[in-house]
């Protein structure tokens, strides 16, 4: 039995670029805190993929405390493949976390749209002559509804099952996540991170304005290829390539007066990446390795950051055999 495909691989965008609201800035990073108590940190965590126990272990290790001004940001791929996607989203929502959309959020949102479209057909009796279904979608859909040909973005063994496991409230929260989260750092504090911090899932192409970045590339890129006929222009590539895209980003930032650091995930095969103006936090927790965070705070007029890791605390998932399968 066939299902109804979503109209686009990129699920409709609610917000492309969002600025971190000033009320979510930790006191230590606010201009007004210069003469006051220095508390609160920005904690940015890489791809969790439903590994709830690992996320809890990392938050415990850094003594995350929202009441003291800590704010959590997630680099996308909170969900899918791991054992407890709903539990991870619950933690993010309960802590008032910020996050960006990853390719797996995109896949699950598309899967949810496909399920809704199929449900509508079932309810109307239009799908292969089936009679109208009741309200319990999880039990109403025939077992083979999502087998067979599927978009490569939405493997049924993961995305459709995850979509069915998440509540409407959780799916709506994921759908509202931006592709780019921008954190404008206070210019009164010295910082090796530059003037601006950007959080994205996979990457950005150097020299292209944020508003003109390709949404699909932001979710999937791992490297760059040079534009034909122009050695200084690049386009995003999903395959790892010989070099990560971060090499050219760092080179580009070296030419600019105002620096921008990008914090991202997605590239588990390269694990932790620490460039001059790039921090890659997908360190392969899903596959039994580490879950990583960068912890950012200010002290004595200077913004400091450090990487904190924990060993995977969940049952790991066997890695797939190709980058294409591991999107």
Image (cartoon, rainbow, N blue to C red):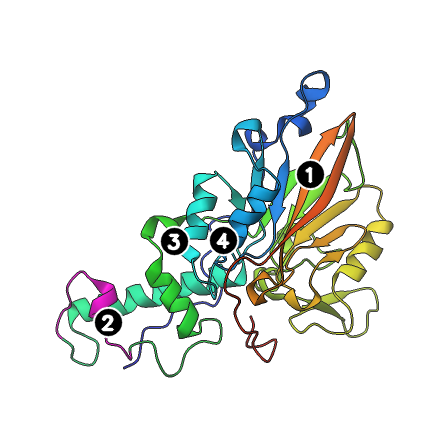
Give the residue at mark 3.
Answer: 171
Q: Residue sitting at 44 percent across and 74 percent down? A: 155
Residue name at image x 86 percent, y 50 percent? 254
Q: Is residue 54 above or below residue 188?
A: below
Which residue is under mark 2?
Answer: 141
Q: Position of residue 115 (x, y in %)?
A: 31, 67
Give the quadrant of the C terminus: bottom right
Is the stretch drawn in magenta largely helix, strand or loop? loop
Front residue of this view, candidates 215 and 168? 168
Left or right: residue 28 versus residue 119 is right
First in residue order: circle 2 vs circle 3 = 2
Tell which of 76 and 114 is nearer to you: 76
Cα distance between the residues tagged 3 and 4: 21 Å
Is residue 141 rendered magenta in the image?
yes
Label 3 or label 4, whichever lies nearer to me, is 4
Mark 4 or mark 2: which comes first in sequence?
A: 4
Q: Let me know if residue 258 is in the magenta part.
A: no
Other-residue count near label 2 (Cα within 10 Å), few / some / many at <14 / 14–19 / ≥20: some
Cα–Cα gap, marks 1 and 4: 23 Å
Kindly check if marks 1 and 2 are in contact, taking CB atoms under 8 A apart as contact.
no
Disc number placed over residue 296 in the picture, else none: 1
- Tell me how far mark 1 sits from mark 3, CA to CA: 29 Å
- Tell me what residue is drawn at x 57 percent, y 74 percent: 319
Residue 164, by quadrant, is bottom left
Could you tell me how many numbered marks the image carries? 4
Q: Which residue corresponds to mark 4?
A: 53
> Quarter of the image containing the N terminus?
bottom left
Q: CA distance from mark 1 to mark 2?
A: 46 Å
């Amino acid at each position: 039995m066939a299902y109804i495909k979503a109209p686009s691989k990129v699920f409709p965008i609610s917000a492309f670029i969002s600025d971190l609201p000033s009320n979510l800035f930790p006191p230590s990073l606010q201009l007004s805190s210069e003469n006051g108590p220095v508390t609160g940190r920005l904690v940015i965590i890489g791809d969790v993929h439903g590994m709830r126990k690992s996320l809890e272990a990392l938050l415990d290790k850094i003594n995350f405390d929202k009441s003291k001004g800590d704010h959590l940001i997630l680099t996308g791929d909170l969900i899918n493949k791991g054992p407890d996607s709903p539990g991870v989203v619950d933690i993010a929502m309960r802590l008032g976390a910020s996050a960006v959309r990853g390719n797996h959020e995109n896949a699950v949102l598309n899967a949810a749209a496909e399920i809704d479209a199929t449900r509508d057909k079932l309810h109307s009796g239009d799908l292969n002559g089936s009679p109208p279904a009741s309200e319990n979608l999880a039990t109403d859909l025939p077992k083979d509804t999502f087998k067979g040909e599927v978009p490569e973005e939405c493997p049924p063994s993961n995305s459709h099952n995850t979509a069915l496991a998440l509540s409407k409230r959780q799916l709506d929260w994921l759908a509202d996540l931006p592709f780019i989260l921008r954190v404008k750092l206070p210019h009164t504090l010295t910082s090796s991170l530059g003037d601006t911090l950007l959080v994205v899932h996979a990457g950005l192409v150097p020299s292209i304005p944020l508003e003109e970045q390709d949404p699909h590339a932001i979710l999937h890129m791992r490297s760059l290829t040079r534009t034909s006929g122009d050695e200084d222009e690049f386009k995003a590539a999903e395959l790892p390539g010989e070099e990560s895209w971060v090499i050219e980003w760092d080179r580009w930032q070296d030419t600019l007066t105002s620096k921008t650091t990008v914090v991202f995930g997605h590239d588990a095969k390269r694990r932790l990446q620490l460039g001059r103006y790039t921090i890659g936090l997908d360190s392969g927790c899903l596959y039994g390795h580490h879950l990583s965070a960068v912890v950012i705070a200010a002290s004595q007029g200077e913004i400091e950051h450090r990487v904190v890791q924990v060993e995977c605390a969940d049952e790991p998932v066997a890695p797939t055999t190709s980058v294409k399968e591991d999107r």
